[in-house]
Image: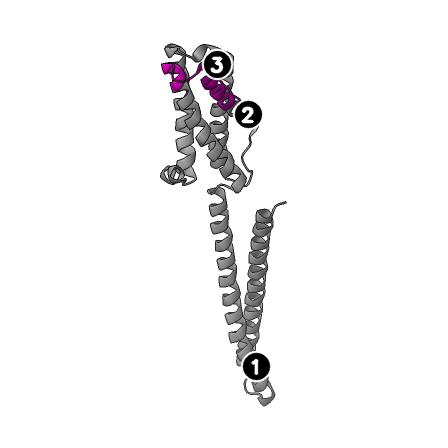
Amino acid sequence: MNIIEILFICLISLSIVFLAFSLLNTIIYFINKKKILSLNKKKRHKKKYRKQLRQLSKNQARYLKRALVLFFISVIVMSGYFLTKNYVEKHLFSKDLEIVMSGYFLVDNYEKSVAQAKKSEGKKEEVTKKITDNSNRMASYMTETPSDMLSVDGQRLLNKYYKSLSEVGMNTVPIIQQLYGNEELSNECIQNLNIVKENQKAVFNYFNIDESRIHKK
């Protein structure tokens, strides 16, 4: 159990406790109200009950005030829970963010190295090594899994992104030696990469990642 899960449990527990005490005070309020009505109807003429009536009336206001305050605290705590949960579900944790950012730069480097191979730019051995390194790293995304603290939609988008990255990497590995100077194969690789970019864009949009800020870094 991580610290976020503990925080969620604490917030829910606090909200339930405050709500329970609010209900308890509300029940006492109505019990007192019934007693006051009974005293007013049957015993108000007796002097010895006047003090009891005043005390009950005083307690009545206190119980009502306490019930309302506890209820509002319960609502505030529960609101804090939902706001925190919504924030956590739509913001990447450091590990997930690091994986997504690595994938972003992998896509960029892969595209550049394949473009070099297509145009036969640079030494074949160096270009081929770059493509090999990038492809192997992309293929390794098959083992990546998003945090289970994220929303179902967020996890689905990340899984789809990771899967498309790994597929491009694995599909490239067998043809690496044929890419240099081969325009048709290079175009096919770049075309397959467009699917990854679409999934990447969906991830960025969902988790509010500003691509322009990544370039500045």
- Tell me the kind of residue under disc 3: Ile
- Tell me the kind of residue under disc 1: Gln
Point out the frontmost of discs 3 and 2. 3
- Residue 125 highlighted magenta (yes or no): yes
Q: Is residue 78 above or below residue 144?
A: below
Q: Nearer the viewer, residue 110 or 160?
A: 110
* Picture coordinates of residue 67, whole percent (x, y): 53, 67
Colour scheme:
one colour
Q: Residue at x 44, y 31 (%)?
A: 105
The residue tagged 3 is 176
SS at circle 2: helix
CB under 8 Å between callouts 1 and 2? Answer: no
CB under 8 Å between callouts 3 and 1? Answer: no
Q: Quick one: which residue is furthest to the bottom in this view?
A: 47
Quadrant housing the C terminus: top left
- Disc 3 packing (10 Å; few <14; some 14–19; many ≥20): some
* Magenta stretch, residue numbers: 116-136
Q: Nearer the viewer, residue 153 or 26?
A: 153
* Picture coordinates of residue 135, whole percent (x, y): 50, 21
SS at circle 1: helix
In this picture, residue 207 sits left or right of residue 24: left
Q: Is residue 83 above or below residue 144?
A: below
Q: How many numbered circles does the render carry?
A: 3
In primary-sequence order, the first of circles 1 and 2 is 1
- Tell me the kind of residue under disc 2: Ser
Q: Residue at x 58, y 88 (%)?
A: 46
Q: Residue at x 55, y 60 (%)?
A: 19
Residue 41 seen in this snapshot: no
The residue tagged 2 is 140
